[in-house]
Image (cartoon, rainbow, N blue to C red):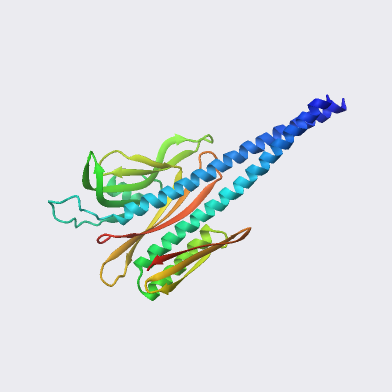
Amino acid sequence: MIEVLISLGIISLVLLSLLIYQLDMIKSINQSRLETIATIQLMNFSEMVLMNTSHSARNKALKIWNKDNAHLLPQGAGDYHEIDNHQCQMTVHWFSGKHETQSTIVFC
Amino acid sequence: MIALSLGALLCIGVFNLFNTMLRLHEKQMVESHVQEKMRFMAQFFREKIAMAGNGSCEKNKKPPRSMVIRKYNADQALDKLGLTIKPKTDLLQLRECIRFHDRQHYLPIEFFIANTYRTNTHQKSIYALFMKINHHPREELMTDMTRLRLTVYHCTHSKKNRGAVKMKYTLASIVDSRFSQRGVLYVGVRKVRV
């Protein structure tokens, strides 16, 4: 009987470690989902900046974009600034356990 | 007796662990499928919308003058196009050169959400994103898309009259009915007027 108990104990340990591994996977998939959303949001804003050339139109677009960021990402917000002639750096940040940031430099 | 009861307890534990693992695996699959769909949406529509109005395949004809991007709500879609789409969703109509019957043609393409007339395990209707080229039958592009709202912008630009489309969509899952993922896509039209 003791052998059965030991083997069951070993099986449960193995399954427990597999469970922990799967929980880790869920976490990383969720993280990757948020990163995908952030990337799409950055691409969206680069299009917005290209389409809206005036300063006021870009500020309006930034407000709309940040509304979407707040809807799609936990505590999501973003900003942009011109770093060079026709080069803009866009950043989006969000919170999922820790502060995450993604940024890109595009032609604008 | 003690060993038997301990063994039974361990068995129940192992069984529960196995069940939880199955559920977690299901959740992983749902999440990864939704991500895949989001990437597909971004890539597919960016290309389609950016190229709207491209009539380069019609070499011998005059450049197309009709509107290249149009938005219809459910009522307008039924009245003007004869298409039944999901209520409170929009239909996107683009005109561009598309490969059709082994040749490039400048044709209207419609994208909309409609009932697939299939049901999930909870006997709820499954909706999908459909693509329809000209007067040909609709094609199912992506299953389990439940919402599509559109905004068409006329952007002010110093030299060209440019346009843009903003799509707000919701993706669901057949496997997990409680799961839904919202998404936003903004694409500028590279060609003529909208």
* Image coordinates for residue B89, horizontal then vertical, percent: 40, 51
* Image coordinates for residue B136, horizontal then vertical, percent: 27, 39
Residue B53 or residue B14, whichever sits in front: B14
> Up-down: is B125 above or below A107?
above
- Image point (43%, 65%), residue name: A105
Task: Describe residue B58's horizontal placement relative to residue A26 as left or right.
Answer: left
Residue B128 quadrant: top left
- Image point (61%, 49%), residue name: A27
Check the image and name the residue furthest to the left. B60
> Up-down: is A90 above or below B26?
below
Residue B120 or residue B61, whichever sits in front: B61
Residue B145 quadrant: top left
Q: How many marks?
A: 0
Q: Quadrant of the C terminus of chain A?
A: bottom left
* Image coordinates for residue A7, horizontal then vertical, percent: 76, 29
Q: Quadrant of the N terminus of chain A?
A: top right
Visible in this render: residue B83? no
